[in-house]
Amino acid sequence: MDTLVTKKLSKHFGGIKAVDGVSISVKKKTITALIGPNGSGKTTLFNLISGFYGPDEGKVFFLDKDITNLKSYQIANKGLVRTFQLVRIFRNLSVIENMLVAPKRNYGDSFIKSIINFKKSIQEEKESYNYAIELLDLLELPHMKDEYAGNLSGGQFKLLSIGMALMRDPEILLLDEPVAGVNPTLANKIFDILINCRDKFNKTFLIIEHNMDVVLDFSDLIYVMNRGKIIAEGPPEAIFSNRGVIDAYLGAD
Amino acid sequence: MDLHPLVFLLLGIGTFILIYAILALSLNLQQGYTGLPNFGLIGFYGIGAYATASIIVQGINPIIGIILGMIIATVFGIAITIPAIRIREIYFAIITIAAVEIIRIIIRNEKAIGGEYPQLGIFNIPLLFGLDYEMHKIVSFLLLILVVICIYLILQFIIYSMPFGRVLKAIREDEDAVKALGKNPVRYKLIAFSIGAIIASLAGSMWVLTQRAITPDGIMPLWTFMIWIMVLLGGMGNNKGVIIGAIVITGIQQIVQELKFYIPTEVLDNNQIISLTWTSIGILIVVVLIFLPRGIIKERKVRGKDVEKTIKNVDGGIKGWIRLLLRS
Ligand SMILES: Nc1ncnc2c1ncn2[C@@H]1O[C@H](COP(=O)(O)OP(=O)(O)O)[C@@H](O)[C@H]1O
Ligand SMILES: [Mg+2]
């Protein structure tokens, strides 16, 4: 069973077929990369999978369940969590508060429940807090804990948004260009963290990356998109000797 | 009992300030924390005021009127926000202002709601607890202080001690990011808006109980703008700040109003004095916002330490709970 499967997903904006009959599947406990030149439809595909856009055609299956028509927050609640290419965080809240908005809570998410079970909701909060501190350590952000999230650097934004996604303990994480604009040392570190999550916590990742070189070392499987279509798929070595892929990149950039 | 005239005057001003403080706290929950620009706030106050007044003139217990007002305000709030809550803030603001103007116009013209003479309003609300006039003033003031403290503590608890409150702030910052984290912003917004509506309705009820009359002019859109000014001036997203905003703005207004008894009309007539009020408030807000763009007291930053304290206080028995409630 594959964690995430799309079947012939399509979405067009006016005349542009941003995503055109895309079928992919992401295996459990892998890091799958989605690469392709700018404007090839990667982010749109993420928006379709995560329920931020409704597809014109096609279906999305997550853990064998059809999630095509679910709302974005329902999909996130099932354990499919995505980040945004243009990082979206809560700028006027502290970093620790950003982390603490994220977790799924049995009591604290509902107003009535958390009043009736206030003590339990704070018990949950305690666990979330400890986990948040742990993750901030892992992401090398502990010293920024009390800083306004809006004051972080570009790379730290990305780290925080990954941290927030991890707070939800998702089954699969969709990361949209998690290392774009991040210096290579930090980029390697981010991928090491993801690999760690994959191996230790059995997490699955689908990662958009614009830069081909970066994904070579870290991905188990690569999909290549161009003009809304998947033009190649395979392990990194195969992809990088594929003529069509190289042409797509040279043609677009 | 004989109250000194100055004490009497101050009690009157204090009562005004406290009622506006309730309204500013309500708007601060909706706009300051959740980012819901309610430009119809005064309508919810009107609902509370008219529900309470109508019930009282029927000779029924005012508590029933207060509760009735809260229920109607909540239902009305949900009815106008459900279509508006998914759309952009600017449309939300327009819908709230329009919906509430409709209420005012109905109240102004409908005897069943607006009283025998709807243009004039509902008068002759009896004194509190059958007290004499002066005791009524004192008790009104004390009662309002109690109400403001309770609302303040409840709101601080919701925003700073409940994980729920943090999500409200996050929605204000970025709704899509909240959705991506598995939370349905609409649900949170409806609850925040409803709590705000209930508080505004209570302000209207308190007005009727303490001032003993309500007129349709009391729910003009102008008053909503006044409350916005208090919140902006005092500090959006700070409950102490908006109370200070209410004190400053209402204080200026009431004091300038008093001036008219001391200034001969040849120097400044009544209209000029009213203009003077608005001019001074205008200058004040420009000056304050130039030097303090986030208001007199800016929003409090919640640090890791604050979260740890909440956790510790909840584990700390009765004493911890008291600390939790009063800490804010
Ligand atoms: N919301 C939108 N409205 C209109 N066009 C869009 C929208 N989102 C994306 N597009 C278009 O769809 C195409 C694919 O964009 P995108 O998915 O962002 O590509 P990528 O992430 O691969 O760079 C582009 O031509 C882009 O202009
Ligand atoms: Mg993109």
Image: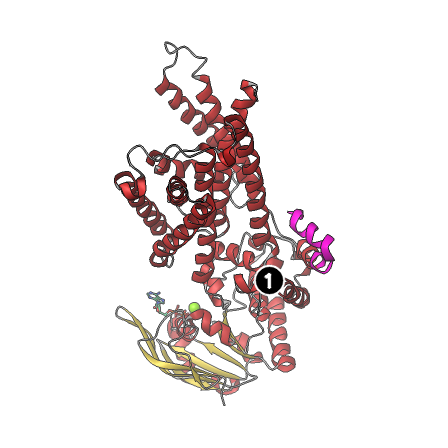
Task: Please tell me which residue is depicted at 28% across the width and 34% down the height of the picture.
Answer: B119
Amino acid type, residue under disc 1 in the picture: Leu
Task: Please tell me which residue is depicted at 39% across the width and 23% down the height of the picture.
Answer: B274
Which quadrant holds residue B138? top right
Residue B321 is a magenta residue:
yes
- Relative to B167, B76 lies left or right: left
Q: Which residue is under mark 1?
A: A100
Residue B271 spot, x, y in % from top left: 35, 20
- Relative to A117, B264 lies left or right: left
Return the residue nearer the eye: A33 or A246: A33
- Quadrant holding the C terminus of chain A: bottom left
Residue B159 is a magenta residue:
no
Residue A103 spot, x, y in % from top left: 57, 67
For mark 1, name the chain: A
Which quadrant holds residue B225? top left
Residue A67 spot, x, y in % from top left: 42, 79
Please tell me whether residue A18 is drawn above or below residue B321 in the rendered image: below
Return the residue nearer the eye: A247 or A232: A232
The segment highlighted magenta reads B312-328
Quarter of the rendered image showing ligand 1: bottom left
Is residue B179 visible to us here?
yes
Bin the neighbour count of mark 1 within 10 Å (Cα to Cα): few under 14, some 14-19, many 20 and up.
many
CB at disc 1 and ligand 2 closer than 8 Å = no
Q: Label 1: state its secondary structure.
A: helix
